[in-house]
């Protein structure tokens, strides 16, 4: 039987040796790095590319970012840092804006300490801050705890608590001026119904500052209350369940569970309230004008008088510089506490 025609079998090893030789000759014409990711274009500045091209591209990208950033930096410098630096410099000058400014050194600061109203303003501001901490610090926390325990109508009550914050300050002051009116005012009418004597709320040296604190507390407690509500909602419910199983009362749960869990928030809001109340201006300016008998003159109200009543902007700038230093100390304490927490 004759064998079928078949192709001649290659000699073992011959083609196998020729193929690598051809591949080697072809690979000699390839550039370094061309076999890596052949379907993807090489990044400029990578191995085998031009480093100058990569640096130029990065420079263009950074330049665009710096251009976008420069607009915000310029606005911040013009409307924040420049007024601060300018105000500090004015504190060392005699400025009336009617004549050229004259450098007087520390004379403005000496005049400040010689003014009896300077000490009165700091004392009244400290008294206002202390009363605001007694009333305005406890009231938002108690309100937040009560709202957090409610199961119905919480959204409506939160809106009610926050509503005074949305009112313009001047509207709030005019509303409370009617409340404090010695004749047809709301508070004196309520006292008349209870057969109690009417009070001179804003005309009494002993009641005027307390009246201003009540206005400030009512107008500003909404924001702090919402902050406390957010902090209370983050407390794990297991802690309250464990306290209830141990037979803890509401007061003990508040003292041993709630307050320790929100202690950091309480401290931060305390410092922010001190900084805010030391800058009180609208309440005494609108309601009392600093009276009666300068009992409600605050730092910013006296600063306003120096600048726009006495036309002594150098003295006003010196006082603002001192206030800036004091508030800067509180701000530094605030940053230190937040950094420690992080």
Image (cartoon, rainbow, N blue to C red):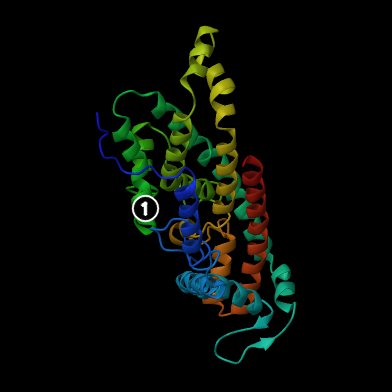
The vertical placement of 99 against 87, above or below, is below
Quarter of the rendering containing residue 157: top left
Q: Residue furthest front?
A: 1
Count neighbours of disc 1 (C-alpha within 10 A) and say few if under 14, some if 14 to 19, many if 20 or more.
some
The residue under the point 55% across, 58% down is: 279
**Image coordinates for residue 307, horizontal then vertical, percent:** 55, 75
Which of 58 and 22 lies nearest the eye of the viewer? 22
Residue designated by label 1: 172
Task: Give left or right: position of 315 versus 49.
Answer: right
Task: Give left or right: position of 114 versus 166.
Answer: right
The vertical placement of 341 against 52, above or below, is above
Quadrant in which the C terminus appears: top right
Which of 21 and 31 lies nearest the eye of the viewer? 21
The residue under the point 59% across, 62% down is: 299
Which of 187 and 91 lies nearest the eye of the viewer? 91
Task: Give left or right: position of 24 versus 328.
Answer: left
Q: Secondary structure at mark 1?
A: helix
């Amino acid at each position: 039987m004759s064998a079928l025609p078949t192709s001649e079998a290659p000699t073992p090893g011959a083609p196998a040796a020729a193929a690598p030789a051809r591949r080697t000759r072809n690979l000699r014409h390839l550039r370094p790095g061309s076999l890596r990711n052949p379907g993807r274009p090489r990044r400029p500045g990578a191995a085998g590319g031009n480093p100058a091209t990569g640096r130029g591209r990065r420079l263009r990208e950074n330049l665009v970012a710096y251009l976008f950033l420069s607009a915000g930096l310029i606005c911040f410098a013009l409307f924040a840092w420049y007024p601060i630096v300018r105000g500090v410099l004015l504190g060392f000058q005699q400025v009336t804006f009617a004549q050229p400014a004259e450098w007087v050194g520390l004379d403005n600061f000496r005049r400040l300490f010689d003014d009896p109203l300077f000490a009165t303003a700091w004392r009244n501001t400290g008294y206002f801050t202390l009363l605001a901490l007694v009333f305005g610090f406890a009231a938002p926390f108690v309100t937040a705890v009560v709202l957090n325990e409610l199961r119905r109508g919480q959204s409506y009550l939160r809106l009610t608590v926050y509503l005074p914050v949305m009112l313009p300050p001047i509207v709030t002051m005019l509303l409370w001026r009617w409340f404090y009116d010695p004749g047809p005012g709301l508070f004196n009418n309520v006292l008349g119904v209870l057969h109690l004597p009417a009070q001179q709320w804003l005309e009494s040296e002993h009641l005027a500052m307390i009246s201003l604190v009540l206005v400030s507390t009512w107008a500003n407690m909404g924001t702090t209350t919402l902050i406390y509500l957010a902090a209370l909602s983050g407390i794990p419910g297991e802690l309250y369940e464990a306290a209830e199983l141990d037979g803890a009362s509401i007061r003990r749960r508040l003292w041993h569970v709630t307050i320790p869990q929100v202690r950091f928030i309480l401290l931060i809001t305390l410092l922010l309230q001190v900084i805010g109340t030391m800058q009180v201006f609208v309440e005494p300016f609108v309601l009392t004008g600093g009276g009666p008998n300068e009992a409600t003159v605050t730092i910013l109200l006296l600063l306003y008088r120096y600048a726009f009543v006495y036309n002594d902007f150098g003295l006003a700038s010196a006082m603002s510089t001192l206030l800036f230093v004091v508030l800067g100390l509180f701000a530094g304490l605030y940053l230190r506490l937040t950094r420690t927490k992080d």
